[in-house]
Image: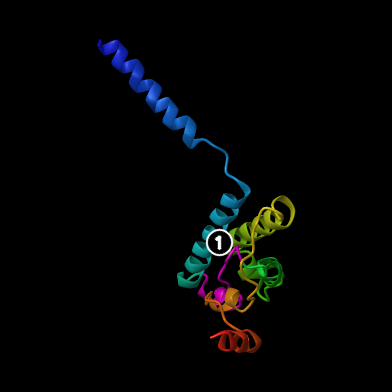
Amino acid sequence: MSAQTKLVSFIFILGLIWFTSCAPPTCYSRVLELSKEIMNNLDRIHKSYRTKTCAELLPKMFLDVHNSCIKSKLRDFLYVTENLPSESCREKPRIRLLKRRVQVLYSIIVRACHRDLVFYSDDCEALETGNIRPRYTEDRLEHLIEDA
């Protein structure tokens, strides 16, 4: 094989790799990506000395895109960020970025892919506590005991 053939083969393989990595994100992958970005932003806001006082005003939020309560949680979070008591908190760049990302995520979930998402849980408390383990209600627990 000549050097020119090896070079053409190498360029073709690189082009193929580049082409496959350029696939557009699906609705689901975009929702997952945005929820991770929001959680990272929230973490930075809680740790930064500039925004720590503002973070105390924000509700706790642990995003799980498979929880059916995510729409109401995002809507409530947006309401709080739009109505922060301090103007300085509302104008902080990190808070504004967080608010914008939450708006985009909410819009994607409600408009673009509300039928594409599958909800495995309806535990609204899990979005506030981060505890996503299934909890059995008394009725369900009684059925489990009876079946045993």
The percent coordinates of residue 107 (x first, y second) are 71, 55
Q: Is residue 42 above or below residue 107?
A: below
Q: Image point 53% across, 67% down: which residue?
A: 42
Q: Which residue is mark 1?
A: 38
Q: Specify the color scheme.
A: rainbow
Pick the residue in front: 102 or 56.
102
Image check: 102 left or right of 4?
A: right
Quarter occupied by residue 62:
bottom right
Whether the magenta-drawn stretch holds residue 53 is answered as: yes
Label 1 Cα crowd, 10 Å radius (few <14 / some 14-19 / many 20+): many
Between 66 and 95, the residue placed more toward the observer is: 66
Where does the image place residue 143, in percent across and percent down from the top left?
A: 62, 85
Nearest the viewer among 56 and 22 is 22
Labels in figure, total: 1
* Residue 79: x %, y % from top left: 72, 70
Q: Give x and y (percent) for residue 144.
A: 57, 84
Residue 14 magenta-drawn?
no
Q: Is residue 118 left or right of residue 4?
A: right
Q: Quadrant of the N terminus?
A: top left
Splitting the image into 4 quarters, where does residue 69 fall?
bottom right
Residue placed most toward the observer, 146 or 79: 146
> Eyeballing the image, is 13 above or below 76?
above
Task: Identify the residue at horizontal 51%, vertical 35% (top origin).
Answer: 22
**Residue pictured at 55% horizontal, 77% vertical:** 134
Q: For the stretch drawn in magenta, what is the main secondary structure?
A: loop
- Residue 106 against residue 141 in the figure, above or below: above
* Circle 1: element type: helix
> Which residue, as the protein is rendered here, is positioned at the far right?
111
- Residue beneath the point at 68% across and 57% down: 109
Quarter of image, res 32: bottom right
Going by the numbered disc 1, the residue's amino acid type is Ile
Q: What residue span does the magenta drawing correspond to?
A: 51-66
